[in-house]
Image (spheres, rainbow, N blue to C red):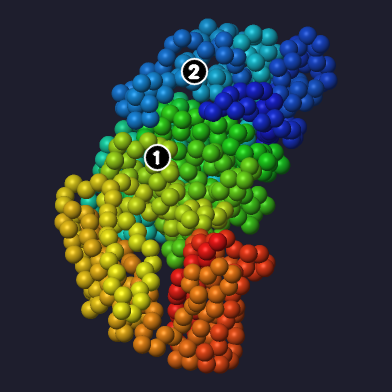
């Protein structure tokens, strides 16, 4: 599009979900579209001294170089007096969702009261066209001429006039598809077809086996259009649709003159819906195929260039999702910078600035699970996450390949205020889904990893409908593959739908160090919900171990240290509850055969400890000492040759020669023939 707009942040003081003030910042504007026109002839630089001082910095700048016939899109930010005493209609489903977090108040606050109809009528009387009314932001988005905005500036309840921001849709990198249908292959279980791998990747197959498919969970998708009359969606439960661009219920309507069939407009949204909600046996099964879906068309997609699309559509879509009772909002959209050099800065990614971020956090405060893409900006000029994934109550999703390596495009964190982002990662490369023309395709991007996580979240709510949004997000993070050491690439690690749910599972067992001649008993416990009696068993139990199942979700593992034990062993425990199966591996390290190969002493130690390596252990290649967080505190690399019984002394300091704290440490010795692990205790 040829028009360009100013871009920046409001200098007003609207309140967000936790009542923190909106951040003030400078605007960057390019001349084409103006905000406010003077009554005195509309000439540039002729602002009247009587003009109310409610203009944002961008509005004021445009006012000084504008003419009175140009149109503007802007927000009218209202004072609290503009709210009516008319509470919105909260559906029964929305009441149930809110009651999980607060059964007494149903989370009702001032944001649930409509803007006064008198104020809306006064705005209408100026001739301005009202696009969106946001009760959450207590604001009205309008399209108006300069003269109309001049009149609006004199309406008492309007506290500030600000520009509508320009945004950019974060799109997946789509693998081109052919017009020939791919010959389906049947998997042995549940007919996943080509989508088996992605379902296994997020472990939704485990929950499907237990009978959880998202039934009764309402997921709102905010996206471009959706082509729903496809074979893949014949059984998909679509309970509500709304086009926030054309204000009607048709979400597959073509909007682009050069796209009369709507393939382009509906492409992105259809990809997302297919990954999460398709049911196409032998070909494509979504992560939550029996969930209910509310489809919100909030973005215009004419061409793949950056477009002027109003953020108010996204906000309106989120408010709509709240009012109809959505449990989850999944959004694969992002907002950054644009070709005209307008947009957000990294400093704006603080969780308080972008209006969509504020709206996303408000949605979370209404007990909605908000899941959004972190963006595809790595190694690009932006090279950071996108809004609204910077929200502190939002689950931001990054992307990995099928081998669990980080996708080259997945945006890095942190947020501007230093929080870990993304929160979680999932498969986002070559995800199988359906295109708008109905054919099978594969696509890549955080736009695809996001619905996989959202689908898994729906399964978790299907297992336990009492989970609050905050509790579920905490479970998702704490059960990520690297929850103990999160970073700004993978967040808390790979998403695990099964372990994020409250379905029964085997509790983790720490690594076991066993001495020759020692008998050790280890209690095995489970936690979570099970509709049937759990059965615990061991796969390929070694001769020096015995396991007893107590038939109540607990068991006892007995281990005997013998000279026949392997130095490093794994014992696999399995839990079966109905059709659901959970499995964990327990690492067992046996030290102290008739000839000690690697020993340490004294243990515990106060100042220093010595590691002894027997000649039978082979030549030393690497010796590492770790703390309980898995961090290397001291290391010796590539020592060769090592004489028989050569002792190595560790003085209890790290690589910076600083004394380490008292506690548990782990020694890992790699030789030319094996790897040995021992546990150390440092005393005060």
What label sits on residue 110 in the rendered view?
A: 2
Q: Above or below — where is 285 with respect to 12?
A: below
Q: Secondary structure at mark 2?
A: helix
Nearer the observer, disc 1 or disc 2?
Answer: 1
- Mark positioned earlier in the residue sequence (1 or 2): 2
Q: Position of residue 205 (x, y in %)?
A: 29, 55
Q: Residue furthest right?
A: 45
How many callouts does the rendering have?
2
What residue is shown at x 50% (from left), y 81% (from top)? 670
The crowding category of the residue bearing disc 2, from other C-alpha atoms within 10 Å (few below 14, some 14 to 19, many at least 20), is some
Q: Is residue 258 visible?
A: no
What residue is shown at x 34% (from left), y 38% (from top)? 467
Q: In this view of the protein, which residue sits in the foreground, 313 or 57?
A: 57
Q: In this view of the protein, which residue sits in the foreground, 510 or 1?
A: 510
What residue is shown at x 49% (from left), y 40% (from top)? 394
Q: Are the residues flagged by discs 1 and 2 in contact, CB closer than 8 Å?
A: no
What label sits on residue 684 in the rendered view?
A: none
Dividing the image into 4 quarters, which one contains the C terminus?
A: bottom right
Q: Is residue 535 visible?
A: yes
Q: Secondary structure at mark 1?
A: helix
Does 518 sit left or right of 264 as displayed?
left
Q: In this view of the protein, which residue sits in the foreground, 386 or 666?
A: 666
Q: Position of residue 607 (x, y in %)?
A: 59, 69
What label sits on residue 471 in the rendered view?
A: 1
Dividing the image into 4 quarters, which one contains the N terminus?
A: top right
């Amino acid at each position: 599009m040829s028009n360009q707009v100013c871009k920046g942040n409001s200098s007003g003081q609207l309140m967000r979900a936790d009542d923190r003030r909106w951040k003030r910042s400078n605007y960057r504007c390019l001349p084409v579209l103006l905000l406010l026109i003077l009554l005195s002839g509309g000439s540039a630089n002729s602002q009247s001294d009587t003009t109310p001082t409610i203009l944002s910095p961008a509005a004021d700048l445009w006012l000084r170089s504008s003419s009175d016939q140009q149109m503007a899109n802007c927000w009218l930010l209202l004072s609290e007096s503009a709210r009516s005493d008319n509470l919105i209609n909260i559906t029964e489903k929305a009441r149930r969702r809110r009651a999980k977090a607060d059964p007494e108040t149903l989370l009702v606050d001032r944001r649930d009261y409509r803007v006064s109809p008198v104020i809306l009528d006064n705005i209408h009387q100026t001739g301005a066209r009202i696009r969106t009314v946001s009760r959450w932001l207590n604001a009205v988005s309008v399209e108006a001429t300069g003269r109309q905005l001049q009149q609006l500036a004199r309406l008492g309840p309007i506290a500030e006039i600000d520009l509508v921001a320009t945004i950019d849709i974060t799109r997946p990198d789509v693998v081109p598809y052919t017009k020939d249908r791919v010959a389906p292959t049947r998997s042995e279980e549940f007919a996943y077809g080509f989508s088996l791998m992605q379902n296994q990747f997020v472990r939704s197959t485990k929950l499907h086996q237990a009978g959880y498919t998202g039934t009764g969970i309402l997921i709102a998708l905010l996206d471009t259009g959706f082509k729903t009359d496809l074979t893949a969606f014949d059984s998909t439960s679509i309970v509500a649709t709304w086009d926030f661009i054309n204000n009607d219920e048709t979400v597959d309507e073509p909007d682009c003159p050069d796209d009369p069939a709507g393939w382009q407009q509906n492409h992105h949204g259809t990809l997302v819906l297919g990954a999460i909600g398709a049911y196409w046996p032998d070909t494509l099964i979504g992560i939550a195929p029996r969930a209910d879906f509310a489809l919100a068309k909030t973005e215009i997609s004419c061409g793949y260039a950056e477009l002027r699309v109003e953020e108010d559509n996204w906000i309106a879509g989120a408010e709509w999702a709240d009012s109809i009772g959505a449990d989850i909002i999944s959004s694969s959209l992002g907002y950054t910078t644009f070709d005209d050099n307008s947009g957000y800065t990294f400093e704006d990614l603080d969780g308080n600035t972008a209006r969509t971020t504020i709206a996303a956090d408000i949605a979370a405060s209404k007990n909605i699970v908000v899941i959004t893409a972190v963006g595809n900006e790595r190694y690009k000029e932006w090279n950071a996450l996108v809004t609204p994934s910077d929200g502190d109550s939002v689950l931001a999703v990054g992307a990995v390949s099928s081998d669990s390596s980080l996708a080259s495009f997945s945006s890095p964190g942190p947020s501007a205020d230093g929080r870990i982002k993304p929160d979680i990662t999932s498969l986002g490369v070559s995800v199988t889904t359906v295109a708008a023309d109905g054919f099978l395709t594969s696509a890549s991007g955080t736009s695809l990893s996001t619905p996989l996580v959202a689908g898994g979240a729906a399964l978790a709510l299907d297992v336990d409908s009492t989970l609050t949004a905050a509790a579920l997000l905490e479970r998702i993070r704490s059960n990520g593959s690297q929850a103990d050491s999160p970073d700004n690439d993978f967040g808390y690690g790979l998403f695990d739908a099964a372990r994020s749910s409250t379905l029964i599972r085997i509790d983790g067992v720490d690594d076991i160090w066993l001495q020759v001649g020692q008998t050790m008993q280890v209690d095995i416990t489970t936690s979570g919900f099970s509709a049937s009696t759990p059965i615990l068993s061991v796969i390929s139990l070694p001769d020096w171990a015995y396991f007893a199942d107590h038939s109540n979700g607990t068991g006892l593992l007995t281990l005997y240290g013998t000279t026949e034990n392997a130095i490093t062993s794994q014992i696999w425990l399995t839990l079966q509850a109905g059709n659901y199966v959970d499995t964990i591996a327990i690492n067992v390290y046996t030290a102290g055969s008739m000839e000690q190969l690697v020993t340490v002493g004294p243990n515990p130690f106060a100042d220093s400890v010595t590691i002894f390596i027997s000649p039978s252990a082979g030549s030393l290649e690497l010796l590492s000492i770790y703390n309980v967080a898995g961090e290397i505190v001291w290391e010796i690399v590539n020592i060769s040759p090592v004489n028989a019984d050569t002792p190595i002394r560790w003085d209890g300091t790290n690589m910076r020669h600083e004394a380490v704290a008292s506690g548990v440490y782990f020694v890992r010795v790699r030789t030319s023939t094996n790897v040995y692990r021992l546990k150390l205790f440092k005393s005060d």
